[in-house]
Image (spheres, rainbow, N blue to C red):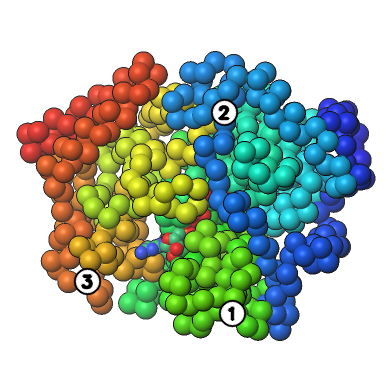
Amino acid sequence: MTTNNATLQSWVDEVARLTRPDRIHWCDGSAEEYAELVQAMVQSGELLALNAETHPNCYLHRSHPTDVARTEHLTFICTEQREDAGPNNNWIPPAEAHAKIDALFAGCMQGRTLYVVPYCMGPIDSPLARCGVEITDSAYVVANMRIMTRMGKAALARIEREGTFVKGLHSTGDLNPERRFIMHFPEELTIKSIGSGYGGNALLGKKCHALRLGSWQARDEGWLAEHMLIVGIQNPRGETHYVAAAFPSACGKTNLAMLIPPASMPGWKVWTIGDDIAWMHLGEDGRLWAINPEAGAFGVAPGTGPKTNPTALNMLDHDCIFTNVALTADDQPWWEGKSKEVPAFDWRGQPYDAVSGLPAAHPNSRFTVSMRQCASYSPRAEDAQGVPISAIIFGGRRKELAPLVFQARDWRHGVLVGASVASETTAAATGAVGVVRRDPMAMQPFCGYNFGDYWEHWLSFAERSDRLPKIFHVNWFRQDDSGRFLWPGFGENLRVLQWILERCAGRAEAVETPIGLLPRSQDLNTQHLDVDVATLDALLAVDAQRWNAELEDIRSYFEKFDERLPTGLWSEFERVQNALEHGTQVA
Ligand code: GTP
Ligand code: SPV
Ligand code: MN
């Protein structure tokens, strides 16, 4: 298999001259090809076959111990003008970036196979989908890309028809973090990544293409590429409304996308469309329509258990790749929160020492699985036009301050709410965990251009439609002094979604506060909910003094964007600040 697309062919030739692979393999995406790749990786020890009885076609990959998460400090946006990348991104001029990274690519595939991986982000026949080609020397990356995207023949055919595609060059290099870079050239629709084989660093269709380059293209073309799950909520009357929610990495997107309604909410059903990324376009009807550009989930393993997320657990017992989980004595995958069992081996393959107090699975251990294995996967996930979005939800992991839920007054206020999101850092990226940092729209690691311009783009939708989704903010992660979660979360989050959708339908009550519209405890469905009134009141309280301090932090953060910060965002900010000062509502 090769191609009749001259641009693609000459790029592959050029990369081969630079990287000097022993072999070139054009991926067709077939089941046979996948089986052969997996077989070769089992032989080389890159994959470990798991218990074939309990987990047929499941494999464990142990990544290099210094390569277990995205590395944000090694991720760059390389635009001609530094201001276009903005203070939210690391930046090197494109010429310098190419020179630096090409020197590392020189000869790096000697003794290896160069795989050409054509892929499509989004349903293959969707006008909203976009194609790319990843060149990689990692069979593990190829196998993951086959699960995560529409990969192979059909994607190549579309590329040959359309002529355009994103170029992504990847090599695991020598895995030395000193020689690891993830570079984006949005003006050239090009990605170059070397030195990591992990997740978002290496599966270039995901964060690099669908978010960093995607957000750049979306701004140019008038749409939105967001770090959002998409879920359909069917109420007991049989009506389904779709919601998109942006939470930072490891803050609950996969779980909300696959939520199981609590027993006390009969008649409700949840339909999963996507668990990480949404591409949203204004439809002719003025509504915002969303597709999930991905075809699989690269989900956080720890915390996935029979009580928290049985839907996810049930899709993980066949045809799955696990990365950095622990192992039981009979070769089943294991992680904290899965069962009471004590595993035999930790994520590095060492005998597990339970008294060490260390987790057995890496906190950022993951599963890769096709969405088709998800019992709640919606047939509408394949719709070429996507699904209409009724509500957009922003959220973060905040043990203090942010209430369980509040609603923005209107779209512009909602953009401020999104731009003001802060969240405690997690194991999804290397670095300290549990530190509150600003993560606007959950896009801090993923926005491919200046946040000031990004917020301007968001605000511009207010002039383009009067049928935009309502905007909300949630926080499932409030804690008491002893570190216990105040809100049960998971399935019970549906109670909050119920209030949100009833607000959209004009049926639920709310009180106006300086930060937005909140339910009183009696406005939430608390039937059979195991949370006492005092806790609920704490979850729904707005502490004006603390919010004043938060606003000061937001102000100094916004000031970094200087004249690129839209005046429209400043005026929203001042409205909230005035309301807080005078103890009035935000309106
Ligand atoms: P990425 O794939 O990194 O983008 O993460 P994500 O946003 O999809 O997060 P995910 O749903 O995988 O959840 C991350 C962690 O948070 C897991 O350990 C979950 O068990 C936990 N979690 C998810 N939802 C809730 C919740 O409602 N309450 C609490 N306490 N924990 C939650
Ligand atoms: C995230 O970190 O937001 C992820 C995992 O979804 S990764 O693919 O590594 O980016
Ligand atoms: Mn994510």
Residue 381 on image: x %, y %: 59, 55
The amino acid beneath tag 2 is: Ile
Q: Is residue 5 above or below residue 59?
A: above
Q: Secondary structure at mark 1?
A: loop
Tag shown at residue 531: 3
Give the label, 3 or 1, closer to the camera.
Answer: 1
- Quadrant where the image shows the N terminus: top right
Q: Secondary structure at mark 3?
A: loop
Closer-to-camera residue (154/530): 530
Q: Crowding near pointer 3: few (<14 within 10 Å), some, many (20+)?
A: few
The amino acid beneath tag 3 is: Val
Q: Report the residue marked by disc 2.
A: 77
Give the label, 3 or 2, closer to the camera.
Answer: 2
Q: Which sits earlier in the primary sequence, circle 2 or circle 1?
A: 2
Q: Report the residue marked by disc 1.
A: 344
Q: Secondary structure at mark 2?
A: strand
